[in-house]
Image (spheres, rainbow, N blue to C red):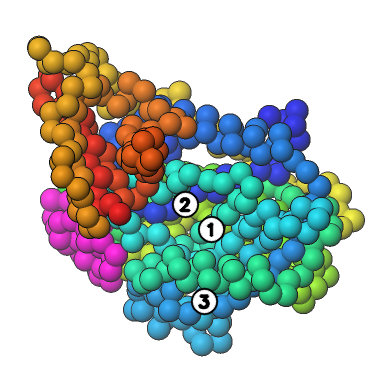
Amino acid sequence: MSDTGYTPTNVAFVGTHQHAGVGGYLENLLPQVTSLGYVKQTVDAIVEGTILAVKRAHASLASGQLSVGNTTILDANINRSPTLQIRLPRETDINMTRIKGMTVLRFDDENGNARGLLSFFAVHGTSLYEIASVEPSAMPGNTTFVVGFTQSNVGDTSPNTIIGEKQFEGALTVMNGERSPDTLLPVEQRKFINFASTFDRMAYIYSSSNSDGPGAFDFTQGDNLSNTQNPFRELVKGVVTPSPSETQVACQYPKPILLNTGYAHTPYDWAPNTVDVQMLRVGNFVMVDHAREALRAKLMSSGVLGADAYVVIAGPANTYDHYVTTREEYSVQRYGGASTIFGQFTLEAYVDKYSSHVPFLADNASGVPDSDPAPVDQTSKAIPLQPGVVFDAAPNGQAFGDVLVDVNTTAYHTGDTVIAQFVGANPRNNLRLESTFLTVDQLVNGQWRTVRSDSHPSTTYQWARVSTDNRERNAMPAPFV
């Protein structure tokens, strides 16, 4: 889409980390384990949907105005790892009170009418977890007012509070309050950093647990001992990945290395060695994907922005590189530190690289920052282990669409569960993009009106293979009003 002005420099691909989405779209091997490898059907759906959305948005471009403001939201996100928080020195002022702020970018048309907002708030979206029945980012939108509640820094900001309404109220406060106008043209810079020399690793503790979800086996958080927790794992890990060198062990200290992922390239790279570093600026608003506070100070001290600077993190963006902790947090080797795959100096490395970007965001900047080569595409080597739809047919004597369990003929009441079961084809035959696998219709004045689809949280769609030649589709709305 470079012919429309969109390039790798001015486009950031920002995901929503929420523990309830589809899998199989990341290129590296390790994140593909739970999805049985690379799932091209998932990737195609994400890519096609994203491009279609951008094309539609581009087709409706119009002149307008931007403004930005922020507010504080209390009792929304909480620290799920206070053991790490208390390790932070008071003078750094990097604590949970610092990430209680919501920044909102407001979009108005030429007449001053609000047409959308993009908010940034720190939350690790784990509250949906594995029981979610719908892909959260697939909720229906609105073409006259578009809202994006963007994840900011994720990490240890648990959402297990009443967080949705609080974010809405916070955004509404900014939309209706005083904001700073943004009038300057956008500026953007992007480069790649090869972290191969830091030897990315996964620790034993990465496989343990945190307060938002238990791990498996006998992995234990906060155990920095060099002696193994399980002799068998010590034997097997050297077969699965290369044994780490003394230099690597020193780089990752005090992390007890479980998997030497940075040097595992068979059948293809297990983890990223090269990551994206990108900054986007419009007026006094700057978006980065790491190291917000350090960058804000650098932008101000360099004279690029004034004291009214708004610097936000949009993450995870472009590359999934797991966690980034301070050295104090890393030293404890709980889940966050164990998941900081590039070692104890990861944060300092990011701050250094992002700081080198700052001069290129100035109004009179020229040139581009130095960059390592972009990472090599891994999809040509990807291994899909999920079988496709080989054969699909209704059972003998039945046809697709036959009703096996019908709804009640008596009236339903608030809180009741409506269940229907049909003979249905494998949904992987057709993902029904921009459509739905089920609808809940209501008879109103003699006309059937659709009131729910599979994108609504109150409905649950399940499909089960009964046998090799028998498929059943279950459309089971949850309590429905």
Q: Main secondary structure of the magenta part?
A: loop
Q: Quadrant of the N terminus?
A: top right
Q: Are marks 2 and 1 in contact (CB under 8 Å)?
A: no
Q: Which mark is residue 87?
A: none
State the extent of the magenta-drawn residues as a range.
207-233
Q: Which residue is mark 3?
A: 73
Foreground residue among 398 and 157: 398
Q: Is residue 334 above or below residue 246?
A: below
Few, some or many C-alpha atoms within 10 Å of disc 2 (few <14, some 14-19, many ≥20)?
A: many
Foreground residue among 168 and 448: 448
Residue 238: x percent and y percent?
Answer: 25, 44
Q: Is residue 4 above or below residue 118?
A: above
At x 33%, y 41%, the residue is: 442
Local SS, label 2? loop
Label 2 or label 1, whichever lies nearer to me, is 1
- Name the amino acid, label 1: Phe
- Mark 2 / mark 1, whichever is N-terminal: 2
Q: Which mark is residue 149?
A: 1
- Mark 3 / mark 2, whichever is N-terminal: 2
From mark 1 to mark 3, how far is it between C-alphas? 14 Å
Residue 449: x percent and y percent?
Answer: 40, 38
Residue 333 visible in the shown view: no
Residue 156 colored in magenta in the image? no
- Name the amino acid, label 3: Ile
- Quadrant assignment, res 364: bottom right
- Quadrant assignment, res 30: top left
Foreground residue among 330 and 297: 297
Q: Which residue is mark 2?
A: 16
Residue 424 visible in the shown view: yes
Residue 372 in the figure: left or right of residue 229: right
- Name the amino acid, label 2: Thr
